[in-house]
Structures are given as C-alpha cells and as structure tokens.
Image (cartoon, rainbow, N blue to C red):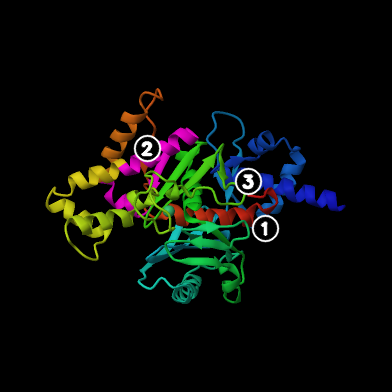
C-alpha cells in the first residue's frame, strides 16, 4: 500500500470513528450515507475498528419492517483521559471515559500559589488519578491541563496573572512523570468546548462560555469550532477596559472588566463594605441566606457582569452565553439581575432576548472540555481536532 493509500485509509477510518463519536449510536447504512464512502470500505473499516476495540455493537434499532440494522457505538471504556483544572486557589482532577463522562473526581484547595508548590501537588494528583483508572485496552489516552492564563500554540503558559506565573513550559516539566500525551489549554476555551460537547448545546454553533472565577476568561465556539485567535490568545476579555482610569487590575492596567466583575472583585467589595477579612464566595452565599443587606451590592455587581456581556454580544452576536466557574454558586442571586440588565440594554438592538444561562455542569465544564480535547486528539489526530 502506498503512503497516499495508507494516509487515505487512516483518514477514512477516523472519519468513521468521528461519525460514531458524534452520534451516540449509528448504523452501517447511516455511516455510508454520512461519509459517502463505499459500502465495502465502510464494512472493512468498521470491522477493523471493532477488532481494535474502539467501537462496539450497540444492539438492534427499532424498525417497522424488514431487517433491523445493527447499531454501532463508541466503546467508551476503551480508554480513559485524565483532566486537571488549575484554579487560582484549588486543583481539581478527574478521570473521564472516552465519552467525556466523569468516573472519578478529586478537588483540593491550595493556599500557596507558587509554581513549585503547584507542581508538587500536580504530580501527586497525577499519581492519585492513575491509581483509580480502571483496566482497559488503551489505558490512559492523554492528560489535559487547563490553566487560567495565556497559552500559546505550543502549550506554553505565557502569562497567568492571577497565579503570577510567566513563561511556564508545564508539559516539559511534567514529562518525566507521564507516559502519555499532555495537552495544555486555557480554562475558558476548555469550558466552551465542554459545554458545546453536550448535545443540547450543539445547535448553538456560536456559543460563548464566560468563566467567572478569580479572574474572567471567555471561550468562543464560532461556527461550531473553538476560536483561538491567531496565536491562541483570544478570550482574554477579562482585560477589556470598561472604565477609563478605573480600578487597578492584577494585569497591571486599570479599569479591566475582571477588576469589577470577577469573584475576587466581589470578595473585595464585600470586605470593604462590611469591614470583613478573608471572605470567600461561600461566605457571601451564606450571608445572602440570613439577610438582604447584600442585595444592592449584588445588583451592582450583576450590572458590571452585564456590561461586559453586552460588549461580547455586540462583538459576537452569540446564540447562547453560558456563565460558568465559581460564580455559579451565586446563580440564584445573580441570574435575574444580569438577564434584566442585558435584555434592557439590548432590546433596542436585537429582536430577541439573548439566551444567557448559568452552567449546569458546575466547575466540571472546564474539566470535561479539556478531557474532550485530549480524547479528540487520541481518537482523531489526522482530522486535526
Ligand atoms: Zn487586567
């Protein structure tokens, strides 16, 4: 077989695998229809994929007459991905199967944000995750790490302002400890991909994931693909300026959106207003249960979130915006005022209200999205996903 034939075969096989991956179950006839490949080619490649344990028979399809076709599905237990979310004050780790479903999770809060301390904890976490991976044909297919910062196309963390890390080649630092591919991504991009991977969001080809945690990042799905920008830096919308000469931001400039609308901005507001110390978002949630003195402050905070969302809506005209990360803890307090503000301000421009939702995946969207990127790289490398 020539190099071209081999490459072509590999590509066709991945196209079939992609179809099985995208559709929960699919028949051989549907595969022929969707891929436009010859019947014999599909039959051969499906058999190979079954032998290699990538796909399995999924039973018979309901049919009103004639022969019922055998359905195929991805063998979700053929391998597992590890996914680690580096937060500003925590580390989360999960194991997912090839469908991106979490089968094991662990989370730890961290006070010391130095790179050395994090690395030590990440290596321990990797070993812990490895111990909980069930036996399978392909074992661990990849490690995905998501970081709140600027990541270049080589996976180098150029700048993570809130962690005060610069030019960190985390993949190389971890190389002695892992035997599988490692993929590094920005946490908001991973979150956008995670949300979009869920079937109920796949109709939203233009979707924004606004990650509001210690800082703010925005992941963009554009025409059904993750938009990374020329050098991979898109989505640093937390640093768009919403107030000239405004509050100082951790990036060193003044008036950035995240200096007003992030978890850390809210915490600072509450500490100043009520002369308190070491407040957490959990404390704020607790306070809203006992009295309503926080209501005006939260309404104002919602407006600041809304101002940034308006800027994004005018730029991207998304069909859906999903707010995720730590701020989802305050969904009951923030969702209504954010929607009210945005819909009030956008009604003269757009006929329909913008679809704004809080993530239902909690902080898992980022972990699942990053894992899905690693799984795609394993299953579909030639398709360049
Ligand atoms: Zn900034």
Check disc 3 and report the residue beneath it: 18
Q: Which mark is first along the chain, 3 or 1?
A: 3
Name the foreground residue: 252 vs 176: 252
Looking at the image, is mark 1 or mark 3 nearer the viewer? 3
* Residue at screen point 18% across, 49% down: 294
Instruction: Say whether residue 186 is visible.
Output: yes
Q: Callout 2: helix, strand or loop?
A: strand
The yes-or-no answer for disc 2 within 8 Å of ligand 1 is no
> Is disc 2 surrounded by few (<14), some (14 to 19) or many (20+) residues within 10 Å?
some
Q: Which residues are magenta?
A: 304-332
The answer to whether marks 1 and 2 mark residues whose Cβ atoms lie closer than 8 Å is: no
CA distance separating discs 3 and 2: 30 Å
- Left or right of 92? Residue 344 is left
Measured from the top left, where is residue 100 in percent x and y?
A: 50, 54
Q: Which image quarter: residue 278?
A: bottom left
Check disc 2 and report the residue beneath it: 356
> Is disc 3 surrounded by few (<14), some (14 to 19) or many (20+) residues within 10 Å?
some
Q: Which image quarter: residue 163?
A: bottom left
Per the rendering, the mark at residue 52 is: 1
CA distance separating discs 1 and 2: 42 Å
* Residue at screen point 34% across, 30% down: 345
Question: Main structural element of the magenta stretch: helix, strand or loop?
Answer: helix
Looking at the image, is mark 1 or mark 2 nearer the viewer? 2
Q: Callout 3: helix, strand or loop?
A: helix
Whether 312 is among the magenta residues is yes
Residue that sits furthest to the left in the current view: 291
Q: Callout 1: helix, strand or loop?
A: loop
Name the foreground residue: 368 vs 271: 271
> Is disc 1 surrounded by few (<14), some (14 to 19) or many (20+) residues within 10 Å?
few
The answer to whether marks 3 and 2 mark residues whose Cβ atoms lie closer than 8 Å is: no
CA distance separating discs 1 and 3: 15 Å
């Amino acid at each position: 077989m020539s190099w071209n034939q081999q490459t072509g075969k590999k590509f066709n096989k991945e196209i079939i695998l992609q179809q099985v991956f995208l559709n929960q179950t699919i028949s051989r006839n549907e595969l022929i229809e969707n891929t436009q490949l010859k019947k014999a080619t599909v039959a051969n490649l499906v058999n190979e994929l079954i032998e290699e344990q990538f796909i399995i028979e999924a039973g018979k399809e309901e049919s009103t007459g004639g022969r019922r076709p055998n359905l195929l599905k991805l063998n979700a237990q053929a391998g597992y991905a590890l996914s680690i979310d580096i937060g500003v004050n925590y580390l989360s780790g999960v194991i997912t199967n090839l469908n991106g479903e979490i089968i094991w999770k662990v989370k730890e809060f961290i006070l010391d944000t130095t790179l050395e301390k994090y690395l030590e904890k990440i290596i321990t976490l990797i070993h812990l995750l490895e111990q909980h991976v069930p036996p399978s044909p392909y074992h661990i297919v990849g490690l995905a790490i998501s970081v709140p910062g600027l990541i270049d196309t080589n996976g180098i963390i150029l700048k993570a302002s809130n962690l005060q890390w610069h030019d960190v080649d985390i993949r190389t630092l971890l190389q002695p400890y892992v035997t599988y591919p490692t993929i590094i991504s920005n946490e908001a991009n991973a979150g956008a991909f995670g949300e979009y991977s869920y079937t109920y969001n796949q109709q939203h080809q233009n979707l924004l994931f606004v990650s509001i945690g210690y800082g703010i990042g925005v992941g963009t799905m554009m025409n059904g693909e993750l938009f990374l920008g020329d050098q991979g830096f898109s989505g640093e919308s937390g640093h768009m300026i919403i107030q000239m000469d405004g509050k100082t931001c951790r990036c060193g400039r003044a008036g950035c959106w995240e200096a007003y609308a992030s978890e850390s901005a809210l915490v600072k507001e509450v500490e100043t207003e009520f002369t308190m110390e070491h407040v957490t978002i959990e404390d704020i949630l607790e306070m809203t249960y006992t009295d309503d003195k926080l209501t005006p402050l939260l309404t104002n905070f919602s407006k600041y979130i809304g101002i940034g969302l308006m800027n994004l809506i005018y730029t991207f005209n998304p069909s859906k915006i999903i707010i995720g990360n730590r701020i989802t803890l305050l969904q009951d307090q923030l969702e209504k005022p954010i929607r009210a503000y945005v819909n009030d301000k956008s009604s003269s421009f757009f006929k329909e209200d913008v679809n704004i939702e809080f993530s239902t995946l909690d902080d898992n969207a980022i972990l699942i999205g990053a894992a899905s990127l690693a799984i795609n790289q394993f299953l579909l490398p030639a398709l360049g996903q």
